[in-house]
Image (tube, rainbow, N blue to C red):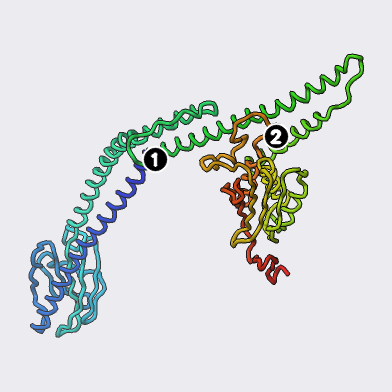
Amino acid sequence: MIILTTVVVTAVVAAGGVLIGMSVRGELLDSADEAARSWAAELVSKVESAGTVPSALPAVQGDEDAAVQVVQDGRVLAATENLDGAAALDLPTQPVGGSQMFEVEALPLVEAGPYRVAARGVETPTGTATIFVAIPVEDVYETVGSATRVGTIGLALLVLALCGAMWVVIGRTLAPVEGIRRRAEAISGHHLDHRVPEPVKDDEIGRLARTVNAMLGRLQDSADQQRRFVADAAHELRNPIASLRSQLETARAGNGNGRADPPRPGLMTETLRMQTLVDQLLLLARSDAGSLPPASRAVDLDDIVEAAVAAQPEHPYVSIDLSNVRPVQVIGHGDLLEQVVRNLVDNAVHYAATRIEVALSAEEPHAVLTVDDDGPGVPEQRRGDVFGRFMRLDHSRDRGGGGVGLGLAIVADIVASHEGTVEVLHSPLGGARFRVRLPLPERQRTVDGQRRRSPAQQ
């Protein structure tokens, strides 16, 4: 990283130096060109005023190395002293009023060079002549060259100093990152309670460390939840398996006369209970893995509700009212939605005293399913807990009168997979109300309890 930064900075500084050098060189050459043009214009004015070319030309003011030559048809009409006797300059002549700039490496009889030469045409009594004014620019190139050499040496020293400074600054800046990396490398699935060091400063590295620690906290919570889930699942499976084993051993032992007892009714009950538990665990595992079937087709939720309630075993003390179920269609997976209804009704039957009411309606933009019972209800401070896995409000391990505490957790997972919500409220019947909201398909409406489809659906 330090090498890359150094290369980039060096390239930027070098490019800036080159641009500055070219700019200074251009400014100095423009200044020389302006001086040559100005002196040439002044000489043209003198020739036009006098009506002839003077035999001796004055030196250029301010620069003794500058030279002037007036040429006509390859003949030198006049020249400054430093070009006296020199041959005519081999440069293009100019028409009257014409002007052009040239650069030559040297002039005859003059050692200094190079020169910027301004050529300008003028009318003389003997015809058109060209005035050449040459300004030396050797100092310009020497100045730019010296500046380049000094800049190169300075750049080299600057790069060395920059490398040292960056080595110290970046090393100190990234030291916490290396500490975070080493600690993160040492953290494994068995040590999720460890955390990376957090710098005191509230900069990018500090925020990175806090984000990593927050992520580790979430991973630890998830791992703890998975461990509790496995422990609870093992406990729940142990009970029916122990009961089955006990009854089977008793039946195999017989009644003392060598004959085995016939299968007991409890065997089927415990087997069904264990099968239900395994099915629920499998469904939750699929939900955790994100492999629940996606909501893919339109289903009649009212038909699902009626079928789920009809499949309930008859209860001598509890009645289920479906009079408020209205025709509603949603996009979803029929079997999973039926599981939602069954679990909610099973829960209501378990706690209801005498009455359950199931209602279904469309309240834009959701289909709303409610299951009310007249049981003891759910305390407000515990309503967020009822959807946890293996969660029961009384914390008893005896499941003889109900399920294993997975039904409502399955409801929450299935509803979430359908992009819906589920909540528990106080019921008008005095007990608990479970309310599920599922998104309605686009353009679906209900009018007076009759489903109306869009023209594309008819």
Circle 1: element type: helix
Q: Which mark is residue 207?
A: 1
At label 2, the amino acid type is Gly
Q: Position of residue 446 (x, y in %)?
A: 66, 66
Quick one: quadrant of the C terminus? bottom right
Q: CA distance from mark 2 to mark 1?
A: 51 Å
- Res 451 → quadrant: bottom right
Q: Nearer the viewer, residue 167 or 216?
A: 216
At x 48%, y 37%, the residue is: 215
Circle 2: element type: loop
At x 9%, y 75%, the residue is: 55
Looking at the image, can residue 299 be seen? no
At x 59%, y 30%, the residue is: 228
Looking at the image, can residue 442 be seen? yes
Q: Nearer the viewer, residue 209 or 12?
A: 209
Q: Nearer the viewer, residue 196 or 356?
A: 356
Quick one: quadrant of the N terminus? top left
Q: Nearer the viewer, residue 297 or 439?
A: 439
At x 15%, y 83%, the residue is: 124
First in residue order: circle 2 vs circle 1: 1
Q: Can you identify the residue that label 2 sits on?
A: 401
Q: Is residue 29 left or right of residue 358?
A: left
